Amino acid sequence: MKKGDVYLALMFAILALVFGKLSLDLYSGGRSGVGASQWPLMICIVILIGSILVFINYFRNGQASVKAKGFLSRDEKRVAISILTLILYFFSVMYVGFFVSSLAMLFVLITYYGNFKWYISLICALLIASTVYFVFSYLLNVSFKFGVLF
Amino acid sequence: MIIDALLLALQPSVLLYMFLGVAGGIFIGCLPGLTTTMGVALVLPLTFGMDATHSILLLIGVYVGAVYGGSISAILLNTPGTPASAATAIDGHAMAARGEAGRALGISTISSFLGGIISCFFLILISPYLAKFALKFSAPEFFMLAVFGLCIISSISGRSVLIGLLCGAFGVLIATIGIDDISGVARFTFGNMNLFSGVNFIPVMIGLFAMSQAFVSVEDMMKKQSDAKKITQALPHKEDWRVIFKNSAIFGSLGTFIGSVPGVGADIASFIAYGQSKGLSKNGDKYGTGVPEAISAPEAANNGVTGGALIPMLTLGVPGDAVAAIMIGALTVQGLQPGPLLFQNNTAIVYAIFIGFFVANIFMVCIGLSSVRLFTRVLSVPKAVLTPIIFLLCFVGSYSLANNFFDVIVMFVFGVFGYFLKKIGVSPSPIILGLILGPMAESNFRRALLMSRGEYDTFFSTGISWFFFVLIVASLLFPVFKKLTKKK
């Protein structure tokens, strides 16, 4: 068992406790016992038992040696920056518009990830955003009516 | 009669429509978030002005193409285009990552074709018998089928079965969110209107497979990219053919049977096939590393479903899945009523559908194999460009499902969660399996108990239930037995 497994089991156990508590407040179904609460309650119990087994395995077999390392490696920092960029992108889509935001997101990320000249990144971003916009908006009738622009 | 059917199905304009349908279906299937059902639904309005043969065969072309197309993005980008390809992504992408993308696509294409052809034979030969058998399924049998499907978690868990089971149970729990179908009670919605209809598994799937994979690509951005020029193999290897034929025969038939059971789709069939092929294969312990059996089995099964779903639709007027329901709509618009009378009054059209289905599969394999080299070019696109494209497709794919921004948020949350799972070496597949099978298991478990007034022996009251029970026990014990005999 890895340390990550224990974190995962802990997260699942907390979730099972919350959902289990909420399940108790649901209609239980009377005598036949098949109301809205039984099934999620059963699953929560399974998750709790499973999580406890993960904890037991982890502590019984001895913790896997995990080398202490810094908060985030250089590669992981790149992922964190990407996640932040995407969150900004989602907000931007809502308030600015799909095409403009997608163009900006693609340009920023392509420039950040690759060592292309700025105009190559811009051309790539423009081509990709236009193709996706055309295929989904015109051919597949997906509505991208967001924000003040388009 | 057969001559009439041949004349109907092999008209040049019908063949052209079918060809375009298959090509369009492959394109739609490739795009994450656009499901097979959505593809067929998008084409449906175009068929209103056509006659019955053109209309239904165009839709069948889209159906066959889209089910196959999902595997292309699953193999090349670890982004299943449709839920039916989620099982293919596990080993297909692993093989592509080894530089054998052409081989993986070749295996997938041939297996899909053979699965489709096998289901076509079943469709022609035994459709009335199979449909009658499938209609004997009621709540206890559906529940046992769902449990049988959930047993596959042990096969797709990766390094820890316990963690896999936890992930599967998490998927089942997430599936309980929303308005309860039976009592109408809102469960775990926290007052959020978007959660009333539950958590759609497609944005979850896009997040767990595609978004998380894109984050991994970002992390590996500085590593040397595999050279796309090395991809010379556009067909399966010599030794793969035996595996493909064997798996296609077994899992194409299994897919046909599963497809003929109303309400059970290609996604469930492909996971069941993946799990069972692992049990049967000599390379069971290598599953997840890119073995041919693990690509061939789910692909044969999901294309087997296409023919299977048509069986109850044509013979009884009962749709096997959502796509078949749309096709029933298309036939009704044409003034045809699917069911026993269709065979009696419009025999030529029924046989034209059989022939058209066969031809659509031939188009699929031709387009698939001729485009393998083109598809593999995707891998030569620099990661710095490809990764932002995947981000954009993840956004558009999850949004276009219902034009709802909430689905994008769900996709993103599960994308970050999937990345965390990948960091600790946990497979996200059991979560998807739990999400897909959870609602089926729960609703049928409760319906069965309601019908039997809480008597649990209802789950063992019929031969079909016992059949599935034996399969469940066998699928759980077979890997243990295999391990023990290997040790000896």
Image (cartoon, rainbow, N blue to C red):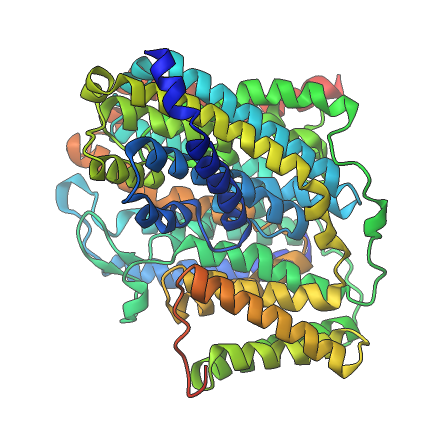
Q: Residue at x 80, y 76 (%)?
A: A116
Residue that protrudes farthest toward the bottom in the picture: A148
Given residues B358 and B248, the one toward you in this image is: B358
Q: Position of residue A14 (x, y in %)?
A: 46, 63
Tell me if I can see residue B281 in this picture.
no
Q: Is residue A132 above or below residue B461?
A: below
Q: Position of residue B354 (x, y in %)?
A: 39, 22
Q: Would you identify the image quadrant in which residue B347 lies?
A: top left
Given residues B110 and B293, the one toward you in this image is: B110
Given residues B5 and A97, the one toward you in this image is: B5
**On-image quarter of the C terminus of chain B:** top right
Give left or right: position of B332 versus B431.
left
Q: Residue at x 50, y 46 (%)?
A: B24
Q: Position of residue B10 (x, y in %)?
A: 44, 24
Q: Would you identify the image quadrant in which residue B99 lies?
A: top right
Q: Would you identify the image quadrant in which residue B455 lies?
A: top left
Q: Residue at x 33, y 31 (%)?
A: B53
Give left or right: position of B25 versus B215.
left
Q: Position of residue B221 (x, y in %)?
A: 78, 66
Question: How many numbered markers are drawn?
Answer: 0
Residue that protrudes farthest toward the front in the picture: B12
Given residues B186 and A145, the one toward you in this image is: A145
Q: Is residue B413 above or below residue B346?
A: below
Give left or right: position of A36 versus B280.
left
**On-image quarter of the N terminus of chain B:** top left
Tell me if I can see residue B323 in this picture.
yes
